[in-house]
Image (cartoon, rainbow, N blue to C red):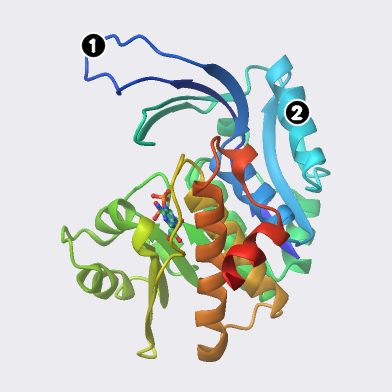
Amino acid sequence: RVVVVGSTNLDLVVTAPQLPRPGETVLGEDFRTVPGGKGANQAVAAARAGAACDFVGAVGDDAFGSQLRASLVDSGVDVRRLRTVPGPSGVALIAVDRSAENFIVVAPGANSTLTDLDAEDRAAIASADVLLLQLEVPLSTVVQAADCARAEGTVVVLNAAPAAVLPAELLDLVDVLVVNEHEAATVGGVFSDDPAVLLDALLELVPRVVLTLGARGAAYADRRGLRLDIPAPSITAVDTTAAGDAFTGALAVSWAERGGAISAETVAASLRWACAAGAACAQRPGASTALPERAAIDALHDA
Ligand code: ADP
């Protein structure tokens, strides 16, 4: 079982020939709304990858909130811990260009009201194998959830996105940190193109680090000295939005299926499967709509 404590946003997505520079207006092409937010995306990713998944979060009492709740239910996520609060739901403004590059601005709305966990949230965390966290809800809530998980023996996986410098209070509760290169540089306070340098800096802070490297796959390091480089499946990327969410959700599922036990033998297998999930997502247009089902992950993994 996986529990996600995190954000849910409606993504307002426009495609354009190129992304605007500051102060510039470009004429876009298609527009669509897509349920998103890193928390909800990773919950959907985990559910589609085959895990029982609870989502602890908040939506507003607007039409967007109903749409967000329905989309989680459609993907099989358990929403009993999802609050509806007065005010707007979170939204994300996303532009995607023809080379599948994107920029994103998030207005948190209801997500910023998720300030306290109640007894039932704590019970859900306690009964899970893996707690999956990101940084789009208040940091104090992320710390509370991680603290509860640590006390109950639930593995804490933190995807440090969006990138931020993190307090020791949180880092001390993290079992596995998942970051892309930009997040790694920010969290680790070190700027390098060399994955090994980023991993070394992060191992000073947490016991296990997974570094995602886009088309180059992922790298892993832990304090026991295990180091792995996992190549990504070779695919044609259409839209890499949410590839990191697909990867992180699948990684959490793979670890949860092993009862949260993290061994040297299973890490490589989990990372390969997570890379297949990220690649399967990048092959399709859209964000949460592109998060792959288990069969699609397995097909790319076994190809
Ligand atoms: P983020 O979207 O968070 O920056 P990445 O771009 O590193 O994350 O992508 C996450 C994972 O998705 C990668 O580790 C890789 O496994 C997969 N992935 C992303 N882009 C591609 C690609 N072009 N080809 C193959 N796999 C990809």
Q: CA distance from mark 2 to mark 1?
A: 37 Å
> Of tags 2 and 1, which is closer to the observer?
1
Label 1 CA crowd tier, 10 Å (few <14, some 14–19, many 20+): few
Callout 1: CB less than 8 Å from ligand 1 = no
Q: Position of residue 161 (x, y in %)?
A: 43, 48
Most foreground residue, 146 or 286: 286
Q: Quadrant of residue 293?
A: bottom right
Q: Quadrant of residue 296?
A: bottom right
Name the residue carrying label 1: 24
Can you say whether 175 is above or below 215 in the image? below
* Quadrant of picture, ligand 1: bottom left
Are circles 2 and 1 on residues that touch, CB within 8 Å?
Answer: no
Can you say whether 121 is above or below 302 in the image? above
Q: Residue at x 64, y 38 (%)?
A: 289
Residue 148 visible somewhere in the drawing = no
Closer to the N terminus: mark 2 or mark 1? Answer: 1
Q: Secondary structure at mark 1?
A: loop
Image position of 137 (left or right of 289): left
Q: Position of residue 109 (x, y in %)?
A: 56, 24
Q: How many marks?
A: 2
Label 2 CA crowd tier, 10 Å (few <14, some 14–19, many 20+): some
Q: Position of residue 122 (x, y in %)?
A: 73, 58
Query: Callout 2, which amino acid?
Result: Thr
Q: Secondary structure at mark 2?
A: strand
Quadrant housing the C terminus: bottom right
Image position of 146 (left or right of 74): left
Image position of 122 (left or right of 164): right
Residue 74 visible somewhere in the drawing = yes
Image position of 248 (left or right of 152): left
Q: Residue at x 68, y 72 (%)?
A: 256
Most foreground residue, 211 or 185: 211
| Mark drawn on residue 84 | 2
